[in-house]
Image (spheres, rainbow, N blue to C red):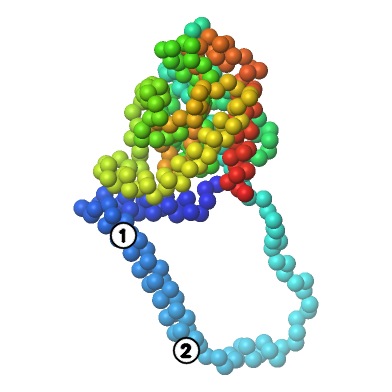
């Protein structure tokens, strides 16, 4: 369930967007106008409530009405059982966080094809289902998946599903291919306007080639407005994504082979949610014979999922402490 501040930030985004798009105002002016209007609205509400209360007190006849006197002199009714107040639950557990798992590719988009013909989309779905099983078995989380079959979902559709489910964390699972078949190992990626290195930039370009991205909430808005709106919520989300990426690296270490400098960043479309911490995990490379062979084995995928679950546990333990 989304926290109150996140919901309020999203409502503010929508209000500023409407003000900026419907007028010729600069984005900063639109934001200031919305905040001013909200302040005036709250002040007017308080003023009206106080005036109504004063008028009611002035015009109220405090002398007892005839009916009230008659009722006071009437014999007391038979005793009845007192009404029971509704029970108050003390220390009720908060709702379990929802983790959205996104198996990469699917349907007409096979993703990378391994050296022996393994499709990335099948490996990603199998690993996602195992991670889902382990998270649900813990009893700590609700889990949703962007797909649970071999079907194509546009990248922005995956982000929309995460918003629709009000996810607290978004994990996209992949197993890409590189021109250099000697490169192997897992890695984790977060969103950034600039890629951390050339290899990551090329990886993001391949992953983003599934379709073209355009945020439904910001269509038809100037880049300047979009940048200001995004800055209202993205900084907090970026910190959450970075924290989750660190948890993944720590959980994979000594369990799953990692790339050198395994925490990287680039402009991955599927990570472009403004208010949901998101990571993309490359479980290995289909272009490497050893990685491909490992990812074909259910035992190895169970180890990957076990490490991912440990990372998810650590992430939510930190943010709830």
**Which residue is label 2 attached to?**
58
Q: Residue furthest left?
A: 24
At x 37%, y 23%, the residue is 198
Q: Is residue 43 visible?
A: yes
Q: Regarding mark 2 in the picture, which secondary structure is present there?
A: helix
Q: Quick one: 130 or 310, which is closer to the camera?
A: 310
> Vertical placement of 285 versus 308: above or below?
above
At x 66%, y 90%, the residue is 70
In the shown orientation, is residue 127 left or right of residue 201?
right
Residue 32's label in the rendered image is 1
Q: Is residue 110 visible?
A: no
> What is the CA distance from the residue labelled 1 to the residue labelled 2?
39 Å
The image position of residue 36, as x and y in percent, is 33, 64
Quarter where residue 71 is shown? bottom right
The image position of residue 105, as x and y in percent, is 45, 22
Q: Quick one: 91 or 291, which is closer to the camera?
A: 291
């Amino acid at each position: 369930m989304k926290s109150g501040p996140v919901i309020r930030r999203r409502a503010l985004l929508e209000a500023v967007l409407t003000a900026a798009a419907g007028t010729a105002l600069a984005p900063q002016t639109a934001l200031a106008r919305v905040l001013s209007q909200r302040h005036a609205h709250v002040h007017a509400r308080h003023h009206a409530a106080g005036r109504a209360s004063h008028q009611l007190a002035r015009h109220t006849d405090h002398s007892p009405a005839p009916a009230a006197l008659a009722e006071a002199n009437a014999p007391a009714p038979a005793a009845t059982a007192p009404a029971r107040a509704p029970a108050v639950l003390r220390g009720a557990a908060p709702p379990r966080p929802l983790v959205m798992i996104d198996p990469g590719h699917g349907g007409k988009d096979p993703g990378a094809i391994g050296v022996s013909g393994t499709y990335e989309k099948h490996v990603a779905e199998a690993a996602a289902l195992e991670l889902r099983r382990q998270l649900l078995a813990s009893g700590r989380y609700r889990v949703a998946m962007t797909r649970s079959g071999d079907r194509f979902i546009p990248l922005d559709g995956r982000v929309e599903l995460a918003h629709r489910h009000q996810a607290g964390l978004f994990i996209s699972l992949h197993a890409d291919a590189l021109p250099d078949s000697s490169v192997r190992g897992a890695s984790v990626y977060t969103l950034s306007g600039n890629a951390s290195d050339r290899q990551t930039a090329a990886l993001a370009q391949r992953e983003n080639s599934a379709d073209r991205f355009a945020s439904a909430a910001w269509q038809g808005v100037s880049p300047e407005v979009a940048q200001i709106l995004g800055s209202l919520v993205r900084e907090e989300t970026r910190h959450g994504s970075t924290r989750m990426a660190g948890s993944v690296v720590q959980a994979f270490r000594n369990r799953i082979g990692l790339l050198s400098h395994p925490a990287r960043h680039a402009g991955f479309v599927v990570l472009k949610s403004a208010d949901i911490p998101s990571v993309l995990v490359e479980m290995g490379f289909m272009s490497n014979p050893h990685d491909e062979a490992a990812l074909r084995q259910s035992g190895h995928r169970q180890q990957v999922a076990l490490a991912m679950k440990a990372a998810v546990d650590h992430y939510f333990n930190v943010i709830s402490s």
